[in-house]
Image (spheres, coloured by chain):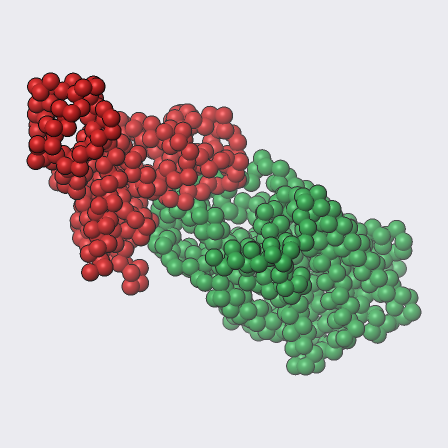
Chain colours: A green, B red
Amino acid sequence: MWPINNPLIYRGVRSSFGRSGFWGWMLGLGLFMGFIFVCIYIDASEDVSRHLTHGNQVSLSQLTGYRYAWFCFGLELFVAIFVTLWIMGDSVVQERKQNTHEFLETLPLHPLRKALGLLLGRCTWALIVVALAGAVGTISALIGEVEMERILWLHAIALSGFIASGFLGLLASLGLGRMSLGGLAAIVFLLLSMGISSALLGEKTVILPLLPLAPLACLGWSMIPVHELPPLIQQNAFHFYSLPVPWQAGPVAFYLFLAVVFFLSAGRGLARPDAARSPRWQGLIGLALFHGLLVGFLADNVRRAAEVCLHSPNYSSLESAEAVVAICLAYLAGFGAVILLWMILQTPTMDKAAAWMRHRPRGPRGNTIVRGLFDDGSPSWFAGLLIWGITLAVTLAINQYFFQARISARVLLAVAGVWALFLLGYASLFQAGVLTSRLAGFLVGILFIAACLLGPSLLAMVTESISPLYATPVGMLEHIEDLVEPSSAQAAKEAWIAVMKNAFSGLIILVIGQGLCALRLATLGYGEPSARENRQADGAAAS
Amino acid sequence: MADSIIELRRLRKEYFNVVALADVDLSIPGGEIYGLIGPNGAGKTTLLRILATTLEPTAGCVLLEGKDLWDDPLAARRTTGFMPDFFQVYRDLTVREFLNFFALAHGLRGGERTRRVADVIRLIGLEEKADALCKGLSRGMVQRLGLGRAILHKPRLLLLDEPASGLDPLARKRLFDVLQYVRSGGATIVISSHILAELSDLCTSVGIMDRGVFLEAGPTEQVIRRLLPRRKLQLRVLEGSQAAAVRFLEQRESVSELQTDTMLLRFDFEGDDETVADLLRDLIARNVRVVLFQESASSLHEAYLRIAERSSHVANQ
């Protein structure tokens, strides 16, 4: 009985349940899912009213259930495949960092049992989220009258994807030794999935496996103006539900095949635990390669998605450039969210954060970014922010010059500016939080997401009738289009309101964060380091 | 050797072009506390890691109870307890959970596991911290927890790499008390340490290593005798007997380096236990009134220095 009495699973369960952090995460997840439900419900009720005025009968519960199921399944697949891969990519690397890999090596367990234990033990939280999202998604889908057979296939894809990506992450962690290279493996894995699915299912279905994997799929979907879409409840709509049943076995079989290969390879890796670790520069090259691939991958998929949109009878009213811009921005928003999650996961200990913040020999800005890239002791979210910015610029540039998808410079600046403001605000709050404790740093991350989602939305609902989802920094992108080519004076006004409101919220978060940070540093007795202190720190670091 | 728990046969370990162990042969009898002594880079940690199956040798083999270690490493891990030099803990588990984790790994189940974990917590003196998170433990407590983890499954071979480094004298004494207790249960202990005085008291056998080879190995007393054939003796006499004692000792060829400090005389003596007994008898026969007659116990340290100097001299040549 492998899973039972596996100490690695015991450890995962023990360190997850019963700790205050666990309930904080669960509460955050519940709030997030509840918030999305409210947004979808409000949108659906508006659509139902619109359809009623056109004489169409659409059930509100059916429409809400159908759309919410899409979100839940998106979340399920996102966590099962992406988050699992990130967690497992860090598994052995983390043990090495903490000098506890000796335990793994000396446990009298079969290597395959260790691999299984690591997967189930480290991904306990991910599994809980997958189970929760899957269960809620199933109920919603049944209310939305999706056939049970399709739901089960979707769960099969999620489960097989979870196992495959988990063992792939473990393998990357063992062999490559760096979490960033785990990310590189992720994209190769995804591209493989795309290639195989394409070969199995035909050219036009190439993006089908991608859609459920898209980060925050419902937000991506919301980028296409709702009033331009046909009722999503129709059959032959553009998403994975429409895939003919026998062909759904393709991705499942593919993932299961990969799962077995990665499982056996990870077992071999664990049987030889003294594998050499990759040096830092290899990690950075891997990271750059990963983002290079990601840019190409995104650009290509955006183009393909636009093509599929245009060839679908349901999207005949969309123009190519609009579709590209909408999907491209949705991906960027999703990628920004992933980077944010990564930052939260990288929260350092208080000592490290305090030491890092005090040591600024060559000015705060340049140095923090450089240190973020190269210093093991500094939080890596600066690197993440920098890379996110570069990826954003390169992706849009590729679309602009190679695919002739015109994206206004004003849109780019507004998007990048507001996102940067929010991320800087987060950074400040994060600094203040982590100076108190590591848990506080995590909580700041959660509160930040809540603030991003709830703050502007609540403001929007109180002040005027903008859909709450569109008032978030992600939803704001929809309105930004109206900055360039406003369909009406009212639309242009709403777009400016949305941008200004988000910028204002970001600024408030930034000011509060900086204030808290300064206060906390003063309480702890930390001031700006003197030149002498910096020289000493440099000397200590060099020695 | 039928009674050897460990036998090394031409064991070799290379890291790229650095030879950490150079065709080592060694046999460690069961039930011993075997001390590994040597400077940094001598190969002690490499040897311990190979014995703990966390490193594979480049060549040669290790026999554990007569079986090749790498034929069945899982079986070897069940027989062996290992405490590495930089011992860390899972910071998000409590002390009890941490030990339960390893108890599960070693196949202890249900009530047996609960009892064994409680016993070990008591043995290492962490009852008060049993339900505290490991991240709140002091360095000494972490070391004790590491020892607890290593002895949890009652291993027949216990491997300890610098277990006493960084511990205060009281914590060190507790550590060595636990080791004596473990040994009384029949386990063999291989320990590497720089604290030679304590190793001298604790270890029944020692091996002195340098540059991947054993320079000397065997029972502690024999190693010291081989390296330091002259014993360091102390003699204290009553007032009035000092001159007679000095006169007598100066006449003996086996005595050298005689130093006097009022009534206390220190000298080197070359001879076995019998000739030491004869010396004392002769002193008393010459009406020297002896208050104290003893051999200095710090000899392992000097033996180590002697062999280290010799090894360094050979390397320089």
Q: Residue A303 falls in which quadrant of the image?
A: bottom right
Residue B114 in picture, x, y percent from top left: 42, 27
Q: Which residue appears at 45% of the width and 33% of the height? A: B141
- Compared across the picture, whether B44 is left or right of A120 comes to left
- Look at the picture and state if B272 lies above or below A449: above
Which image quarter is the C terminus of chain B in? bottom left
B266 and B203: which is toward the camera: B266
Q: Residue furthest right?
A: A489
- Compared across the picture, whether A420 is left or right of B121 comes to right
- Look at the picture and state if A53 lies above or below B209: below
Residue A276 in picture, x, y percent from top left: 39, 59
- Compared across the picture, whether B239 is left or right of A189 comes to left
- Compared across the picture, whether A531 is left or right of A46 comes to left
Q: Which residue appears at 55% of the width and 69% of the height? A: A288
Q: Residue A81 falls in which quadrant of the image?
A: bottom right
Q: Which residue appears at 84% of the width and 65% of the height? A: A495
Which image quarter is the N terminus of chain B in? top left
Residue A414 in picture, x, y percent from top left: 78, 68
Q: Which residue appears at 40% of the width and 29% of the height? A: B170
Q: Is residue A240 visible?
A: no
- Look at the picture and state if A265 lies above or below B132: below
A272 and A316: which is toward the camera: A272
Residue A5 in picture, x, y percent from top left: 42, 37
Say how many tags the image has.
Answer: 0
